[in-house]
Image (tube, helix red, strand yellow):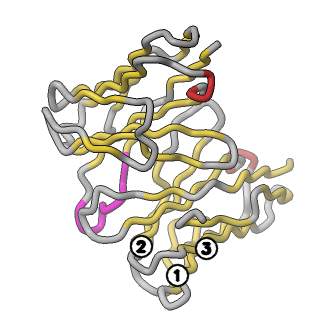
Amino acid sequence: EAAVTQSPRNKVAVTGGKVTLSCNQTNNHNNMYWYRQDTGHGLRLIHYSYGAGSTEKGDIPDGYKASRPSQENFSLILELATPSQTSVYFCASGDGWGANTGQLYFGEGSKLTVL
Amino acid sequence: QQKVQQSPESLSVPEGGMASLNCTSSDRNFQYFWWYRQHSGEGPKALMSIFSDGDKKEGRFTAHLNKASLHVSLHIRDSQPSDSALYFCAASPSSGSWQLIFGSGTQLTVMP
């Protein structure tokens, strides 16, 4: 089965600090995504990538950067973390066409708390 | 306004009962629908897709799509405690699109 792994799984950061969330996929998918999950908001797209070297803004990119150095790895970077960025972050990969359009494979999530 | 709206926010059904979850898109561009399921402490997992009008059945799960009204539903018959989870509806505008917009979810609890 498709595998997406995230690290760290839990992170406590201080306001103003830098946080990097990492994601690795072994699916050889071109597309990778970072979502955040908050109660009442579902999953909201932060950044996504079409392949190595590309990053694109999603629906809520402010305060976040992304990096896709290789097909397998996609990082989410918070240069100056704020308490409003306390959330659970999910990485996903996908390459769906036709019947697989919209099929994403998610990691287990990274819980970030900014104090 | 969210492009994908789900109802109800939460739902409780007895074991063996029928659970019905609803989803509506406010954007006619979004015509490919998925249901995702998320158990507590895990990432969401794709449950089933529906792209054509009518019903699609997979085991105890049946999805129904009405493209004219952009309404999709998920019905779970003979609900089991293991079905207790957060269910997301997600929509995509076209085949191969990168876009997948999620609703806010329905929390289903199946009571033993």
Question: Badge 3 is on which residue?
Answer: B73
CA distance separating discs 1 and 3? 10 Å
Under tag 3, what secondary structure?
Answer: strand
Determine if marks 1 and 3 fall on one subunit: yes
Q: Nearer the viewer, mark 1 or mark 3?
A: 1
Kind of residue at badge 3: Ser
Q: Toward which corner of the image does residue A76 lie, by quadrant?
A: top left
Whether residue B99 is in magenta: the answer is no
- To the question of a shared chain for discs 3 and 2, the answer is yes
Residue on which disc 2 sits: B30
Q: Chain of mark 1?
A: B
**Residue drawn at 40 percent across, 82 percent down:** B52
Quadrant for residue A53, please give it: top left
Q: Secondary structure at mark 2?
A: loop
Disc 3 and disc 2: Cα gap in Å?
Answer: 15 Å
Kind of residue at disc 1: Leu
Which secondary structure, mark 1? loop
